[in-house]
Image (cartoon, coloured by chain):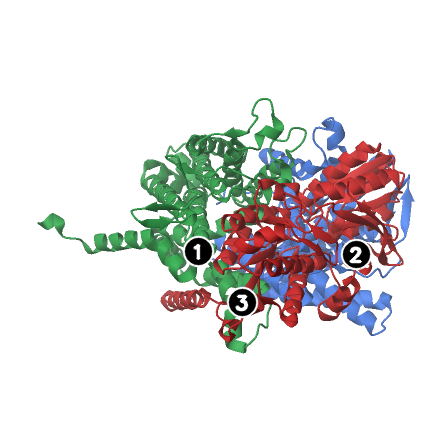
Amino acid sequence: MEIFLQQIINGLVQGSVYALVALGYTMVYGILGLINFAHGEVVMTGAMLALSALTALIGWGVSPLLALPVSLMLAMAGCMALGYGIERIAYRPLRHAPRLAPLITAIGVSIVLQNLAMMIWGREYHAFPQLIINRPHLIFGAIINDIQIIIVVMAIGLMAGLMVVVHRTRLGRAMRAVAENQHAAQLMGVDVNRVISITFMIGSALAAVAGLMVSANYGLAHYYMGFLLGLKAFTAAVLGGIGNLRGAMLGGLLLGLIESLGAGYIGDITGGFMGSQYQDVFAFLVLIAVLVFRPSGLLGERLAERA
Amino acid sequence: MSARPVLSLLLAALVLLFSACGKSASDQAAASGDLVVRIGSAAPLTGPLAHMGKDNENGTRMAIDDANAKGIVIGGKKVHFELISEDDQADPKTATIVAQKLVDEKVNGIIGHLNSGTTIPAAKIYSDNGIPQISPSATAVAYTNQGFKTAFRVMANDAQQGDVLGAYAVKNLGAKRIAVIDDRTAYGQGLADEFIKAATAAGGEIVAHEYTSDKSVDFTAVLTAVKGKQPDLLFYGGMDAQGGPMARQIKALALNVKYMMGDGGHTPEFIKLAGDAALGVYASLPGVPLDKMPGGKAFSERFVAKYQPIQLYAPYCYDAVNVMIAAMQKADSAEPARYLPMLAGISYDGITAKIQFDAKGDLKGGTVTLYQVQKGQWQPLETVGAQ
Amino acid sequence: MKNFKFSKRGLLFFLMFVAVLALPFITDALLGRGWVRIVDFAMLYIMLALGLNIVVGYAGLLDLGYIAFFAVGAYCYALTGSPHLALAFPQLFPDGVHLSFWIVLPMAAMLAGGMGVLLGAPTLRLRGDYLAIVTLGFGEIIRIFMNNLNAPVNLTNGPQGISRIDPVRIAGVSLNTTQSVFGITLPSVHLYFYLFLGFAALVAFVSHRLEKSRIGRAWMAIREDEIAASAMGINTRNLKLLAFAMGAMFGGVSGTLFAGFQGFVSPESFSLMESVMVLCMVVLGGMGHIYGVILGGLMLALLPEMLRHSVVPLQQAMFGKVIIDPESLRMLLFGIALIVVMLYRPAGLWPSPVRRRELASDEAAERV
């Protein structure tokens, strides 16, 4: 029972990490209908920037409690600039191009960011300093520690915050208008380019937060870390219904739970024939099953048949 | 249309690139009348294993610089050794391309590759062209099992190392219930399987065998599954980049086990990444501790001063180059066909071990040393000879 | 006498044909044998790109797991053309299975085609990005199985891969050896070049015939508007499955060739990045246009290698020393090239004339 509960907690934490990243994907997709494949690399950049800022600040003798928020701010600012730049250079000129063209530029951007990061920060794995004392808490024999609690709370909080932005503010209304029909929105006086830029910047700021949290939780940062994380988060976003903020959260949590329960129990279910090496197979099979019955994901709206 | 100038610009760039490709590094030091001997190095210099690859390249480079400084004479001519380093991206297909390129550049010998998955297909090309290859780090048994006369390694293979680790876990550490995790790479899976064989033979019980990947960062799910089986020792077959964070997560989950890795864990990276969870972790490394070998300590000091802390295989690369050069000196020729028989029968005192090859090209009687993290450093515990 | 007059076009084709035949010799003489091997791999990639072009370019189905079919083909030949199966079934096959390449090839193509249908069936209702993630998952599932099926029965040898695969033989002559024909010595890489060239030409020819056939037109109708297509009486389900199957078959064929050529297969060769690469070739070259796709395949297979060979010398020539790490610079330039090409030629480097017209009219409509 303890073990089962621990697996649930593992799944929730891992799922919240996926959800944090998936929110960024879904944000951009919801407005533009474009998969920002470079998002995982933005997360990586965020983690790296935060790490550099932290190391520098602590080196100057700033207290960790101050250094942490400051470096988070710096990382967010850096990522927002990056997100803005990516949109301007790689996506905006292709807004009316064939659908696959921005996909290729996104892949190009990922490769560029990865290699730039390797040039700047080197090839090695960086240990992320442990700043706050990460106390473990016991819940019925299962363990969860401070950072993990922060991650779960943050994922839910950010999702709620984004929902408020999208549904309650003037900017959000503009975003929804752009998502609905860019031309009509423009005619109604919405500055489409500005709205899209802001969307990208918000998504990238989220990525910075996610990057910092991931690095703090696992204690490492690496120029390659964005790839797998981006892929998993994308899977989560699709599972929940891409373009839908609650879907990203739900998809992330679900994927995390599927993975941890899969890794923990496939062996027992199949009598030892298959083990945790098939956890990704398990996750993808669930995804396929969901999409077969709900082709737009769990919470995705049923889009009219549009190409 | 604005497309035409762009296209022509692109074409021009391609032509420029092509013209730059050709025969690049060839005719440099040859003019001075020295005998130029080219040593090829192949390792992943991009991708997740880039830090290891660079380490290999540096180890090889240092041996070559040393040899040049010594002014070695072969066949009556002063020899100038030249390093040709290639990036195989840890990808088998790229490895064969790189191998062919090195063969084209008429290298006299190869130090590489780093991974087993790249070493195996590349070995075929070196063998076809009769060029001796010494891998500093490929441990898969299959590498020397292909029947190629040109394939050697200066590293204990999975079977040799797994043997020592499995027996040590049961006999010296008193493990009875053993859990194993491997990363499903050629290295991790191979070592874990050999470990399981040896541990079972020594009387240990394998209570769990779980899996992760060489790109994962979260191991809580498999570790929790392991916890449910209540083992007293956990063996991880994989590299430092996963092993370090795994150590932290073992501690965070209050999983009370002795934690053990193979040579992939024996790095300064591991201690850095594991943080305070590194204390008491066991790992192995083929050969004898550097400090105990003549010239070993000097090597590590010089290496650190010149490059960066030794990641893992740099000393083996250094040895591999020196063994190769020793064979050339013995044959008094750098021709692959001439010095190859000398290489097969050589006995050389390296900085990692006394190097002799068996009929397959494996290290004869490969010794393995066990280490433990104490006071933030890997401390040697015991050196065990494989039977 | 009129018949003997070469048309300009015919002459051009003849010259190109001769140039292609001489390519390995020219490359070998100018750049070295390593480049012949690179060109060999480029031929394999062209085959893959042409296969994927059927799925993505003609039928408009975004497939991010295409490399799985390549893997299926490669493993088919690896299992049936190497000593490996002796490990799993020592009684049944004491020396492993050593079927002829020419027997395995059609089997592998059929099997890969079957897998294509298997992938296609559950994804018929999905479109665009949803299809992309499911195909991506499919590719990963295949790779994971290959990586793990070494236990309980050692079928694929897991991550260790399968080595010592038999070379391709033509009429008893192994392509792994140097041969001489009419006094011309042909090293192994040259022999494989002609083999791959032949297959690539075949795949291109079949693609061309498909494009011009009823089936091809139906695929393009589905690509442009699925509902309209089905209203016109096109059986979209069967045609989509057919596209998956055809594409997969070509992938399987090139995988089989790859296994014979390299002599070693392991799951690392079939990662997601490879699928992405092949997709880049198709899109960058010009989706749905055979010449464009061939160009894309050639460029993306050769570009990273060209950069590998030129980054260091160029830096040395310009600055006198190596300033930036050549490997990361190489990949960096590759990434930049992908972006720049797409920005200036969003329909690909060499789009089909039809596609270009459509785009132009789209733009015109946009401006109205």
Q: How many marks?
A: 3
Q: Which of pointers 2 and 1 indicates the residue nearer the eye?
A: 1
Residue B208, image x and y in percent?
A: 79, 34
Q: Which mark is residue C44?
A: none
User: What amino acid is labelled 2 in the image?
Assistant: Leu
Task: Give the colour in which the image draws chain C.
Answer: green
Q: Which mark is residue B36?
A: 3
- Determine whether the residue tagged by mark 2 lies in a helix, strand or loop: helix
To which residue does mark 2 refer? B273
Q: Residue at x 68, y 42 (%)?
A: B184
Q: Which of pointers 3 and 1 indicates the residue nearer the eye?
A: 3
Closer to the N terminus: mark 2 or mark 3? 3
Q: Residue at x 63, y 35 (%)?
A: A285
Examine the image and state in which quarter residue C364 appears.
bottom left
Is disc 2 in the same subunit as disc 3? yes
Q: Residue at x 90, y 38 (%)?
A: B174
- Determine contact: label 3, label 1, CB under 8 Å: no
Q: Residue furthest bottom?
A: C319
Q: Nearer the viewer, residue A178 or B30?
A: B30
Any idea which chain is the blue one in this picture? A
Q: Which mark is residue C33?
A: 1
Task: Give the colour in which the image draws chain B.
Answer: red
Cα–Cα gap, marks 3 and 1? 21 Å
User: What amino acid is labelled 3 in the image?
Assistant: Val
Q: Nearer the viewer, residue B93 or B146?
A: B146
